[in-house]
Amino acid sequence: MPSLQFTAESSSNGMIERDFTVGDVPGVLWSPASSGTDRAPLVLMGHNGGGHKKHPSMSGRAQRLTACGFHVAVIDAPGHGDRPRTAHDEQDIAELRKAQATGTQGPVVVRYNARLAELAVPEWQATLDALQELPEIGTDGPVGYFGLTLGTAIGVPLVAAEPRITAAVFGLMWPDAVAEAAQQITVPVEYDIQWDDEIIPREAGLALFDAFASKEKTLHANAGKHFDFPRFEADSAVRFFARHLGRTANSPANSPA
């Protein structure tokens, strides 16, 4: 099993940031500065397509979650962040840009994200194995997952395959490649859509929400287009994880979502 190696550490605003690698996969672990070696729940976060582990949306959500006592971990998806792109990545991205120019990117994104998910799910499982070796996380603590767009494309098959994850927040994704995995998910789910999404049709978002087999699932639908996703939904996610993973929600108001 690949071991976790910390490569850098810094702290600010009550949050410790530690860069790590698990094999050749780079990641970051954010923790409350005051936690020491005390056990705390872990939230795994998947970044958006075209993003990376330290994108402002990731660090902003991490700030909210660590303020409530959670550890938060993000790894770079294949071909993203500090990971090199393969020739296959370059071909898919070129095809995606061409499709975006004509507004027909849906099938291309679905296919591209499905390929990344196939690679990323075992990487996430190896990362979780390694993180649970840390005394401040442990093997018996609760684990959640939070990811939108590409983070959902990777997160749905991950949560379906990984019994250690007991609550998840998803959103903004087509059902095509993930509906079958969603039907295997029974843990509590919070799902976000944009009601006027010009990229992912409303019916597609509703179909994916409907596919989850969870007895407890909540749909959050906000007015606006795809990139109008409101920052306050990050606070809702914190409250969701506080309910299901056992912490008190008291998140800062001004962190990027």
Image (cartoon, helix red, strand yellow):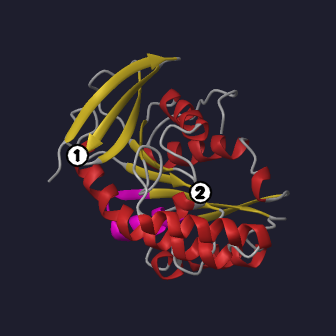
Q: Nearer the viewer, residue 240 or 101?
A: 101
Residue 34 picture location, percent across and down: 39, 18
Q: Tell me: residue 67, above or below residue 118.
A: above
**In which image quadrant can residue 3 be found?**
top left
Residue 31 picture location, percent across and down: 40, 29
Q: CA distance from mark 1 to mark 2?
A: 24 Å
Which element is circle 2 on?
loop
Q: Is residue 100 magenta?
A: no
Q: In screen coordinates, is 131 left or right of 89?
A: left
Q: In screen coordinates, is 54 left or right of 8?
A: right
Q: Is residue 21 visible?
A: yes
Q: Mark 2: give few (<14), some (14-19) or many (20+) Cα within 10 Å.
A: many
Image quarter hosting the C terminus: top right
Residue 201 picture location, percent across and down: 76, 74
Q: Is residue 157 magenta?
A: yes
Q: Which residues are magenta?
A: 153-166
Which residue bears the numbered disc 2? 148
